[in-house]
Image (cartoon, grey):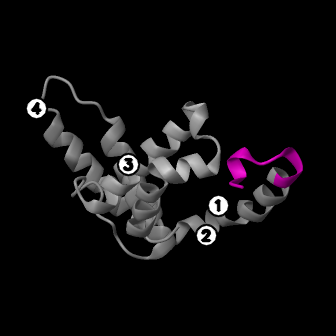
Amino acid sequence: MPILVSSGDKWKRRRKLLTPCFHADILKGFLTVFNEHSRKLVEHLRQERKKEFTYIGIPVTLTALDIIYETMLGSSVGALDNNNSQYIFAMKRLLEICTSKIIKIWKWPNFIHKLTSGKEARRHIKTIGGL
C-alpha cells in the first residue's frame, strides 16, 4: 500500500525512513538538475507569454516529472520538451484508469477491473518501466 494512503502507524514509520532523503545536504547534490529543468521551464513560460492565457499546471507538472525522474533514475524523460511521448501518454492514461476504478464502484472488485481496463493498465505500466 502506498505511503499516502497508509494507516497512521505505517505512515509514520515510512515517513521516518524517507525524511533523511530530503535533508538539505542530500538535496544540494541535485541542485544542477533542479536548476537545469527550472531554466527550461522559465524558457517555456517565456514563449507562452505571447498567448492571451496559459494554464501553467501542465508545464509545471511535466517539469516536476522531469526532475523526479532524473534525480531518482539518473536519466531524462524529456517530459516538458516532448509531452506527446509514449511515456507521458502512458502516465496520463494510467492516471485516468486508476481514477475510473476509484470512482466507479462496480470496478472495485479486481476481477472486474481485470476484465475491463486491467489489461490496458498493465500495458501502460510496462511502458512506464514496470513500476
Mark 2 or mark 3: whose residue is earlier in sequence = 2
Pointer 4: residues within 10 angstroms few (<14), some, or many (20+)?
few
Q: Amino acid at mark 1?
A: Phe
Q: Main secondary structure of the magenta part?
A: helix
Q: Amino acid at mark 3?
A: Arg
Which residue has dot 2 on it? 26
Q: Give percent across and percent down for residue 128.
A: 41, 65
- Tell whether position 3 is magenta: yes
Quadrant (top left, top right, bottom left, bottom right) of the N terminus: bottom right
Mark 2 or mark 4: whose residue is earlier in sequence = 2
Residue 22's tag is 1
Residue 93's tag is 3
Which residue has dot 4 on it? 50
Q: Amino acid at mark 2?
A: Ile
Q: From mark 3 to mark 1, how far is it between C-alphas?
A: 30 Å
For image coordinates 84% across by 58% down, the residue present is 13
For image coordinates 44% across by 71% down, the residue present is 129
* Magenta span: 1-10
